[in-house]
Image (cartoon, rainbow, N blue to C red):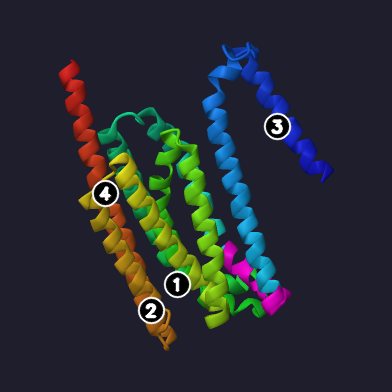
Amino acid sequence: MPVIVLVAFSSMIITISYSWRIYPFRLGGLGGVLGEGMEMVRLGVAFVFAGILGSGAEMVIRSYLNVSGGLEVVGLYNAGFMLTVTYAGMVFSSMETDYFPRLSAVNHDTAAVNITINRQIEISVLLLSPMLSILMLALPLLMPLLFRSDFAPIVPMAQVAVFSMYLKAMSLPISYVTLAKGDSLSYLILEIIYDMLLVALIILFYDCWGLFGTGLALSLSYLVDLILVYVYARIRYRYIVSSSVLLYAGIQLFLGGVAYWVTFAGSSAVYWLAGMCVCTASMAVSVHILRKKTSLWDALMRKILHRHD
């Protein structure tokens, strides 16, 4: 604990020492830094509080699993959750760092907001889908490398939970529009609804199908969350999903479904051969579309620069 605190404190001191050279710290009441940053403070409070509620939901889930199945089930659930949600979450975090400022910069332009959200969904789906299909099929190999053989039951749970990351790639860019619009209360309410839904589904599905049910509940909760945030954004902010998003997501979800179907193959030769074909197809689709879109974007930029010249 002292090491964690000292590292965080050292990082804070270094950051402040460099940032103050450009932006000196000053307090001027409501007319100064406090007043100027109050909107950001409200968004930050909502974001942090949503994170606290999410952690609370996970604590409730683990407490229930501990009571119903024991510490062994909790350990298996944590391992499966880490293999799917946590690892893919690192990719989402890196994307959000660039995405949220771009979305906030155009938050008063409905057309620009729609374009920004749809492009982010396209990029997220195209970049993540090949990785997710590979993860789904490689889990039988990854599990013995990362854990002991006692953790073998997490493979079916993690494989079905991978679909939650496909759905999160589509729901996360939409959910951030509430923060970009400064509507912190709506963001918080939507997060609370999702947390309550997740807890209820995992409790219900674990009672029905055990550890596999928790993975199924994760995917179903993200599906409901996607529908909920889309309907809210459609009504409140006039967001319209593009046809290209539906097409790309449909193709990659279909290939993800095929990859999951391959996991039931009895023969190892069929498993790996079919799995390699599916992963290659998913990667080829993503690379082809990304190259095509990059070429169109370069052509558009050249045309804009030519007009300025």
In this view, the residue in front, 17 or 71, is 71
Residue located beneath label 2 in the image: 262
Label 3 vs 1, first from the N-terminus = 3
In this view, the residue in front, 259 or 77, is 77
Please state which amino acid type lies under the numbered disc 2. Answer: Val
Mark 1 neighbour class, 10 Å CA radius: few under 14, some 14 to 19, many 20 or more: many
The C terminus lies in which quarter of the figure?
A: top left
Point out the stretch of residues depicted in magenta: 67-82
Residue located beneath label 3 in the image: 11
Q: Position of residue 243 (x, y in %)?
A: 21, 52
Q: Nearer the viewer, mark 4 or mark 2?
A: 4
Measured in 3D between alpha carbons, the distance from the residue under mark 4 to the one under mark 2, in whole angstroms, is 31 Å
Please state which amino acid type lies under the numbered disc 3. Answer: Ser
Q: Which mark is residue 241?
A: 4
Q: Is residue 116 left or right of residue 214?
A: left
Q: How many marks?
A: 4
Residue located beneath label 1 in the image: 137
Measured in 3D between alpha carbons, the distance from the residue under mark 4 to the one under mark 1, in whole angstroms, is 30 Å
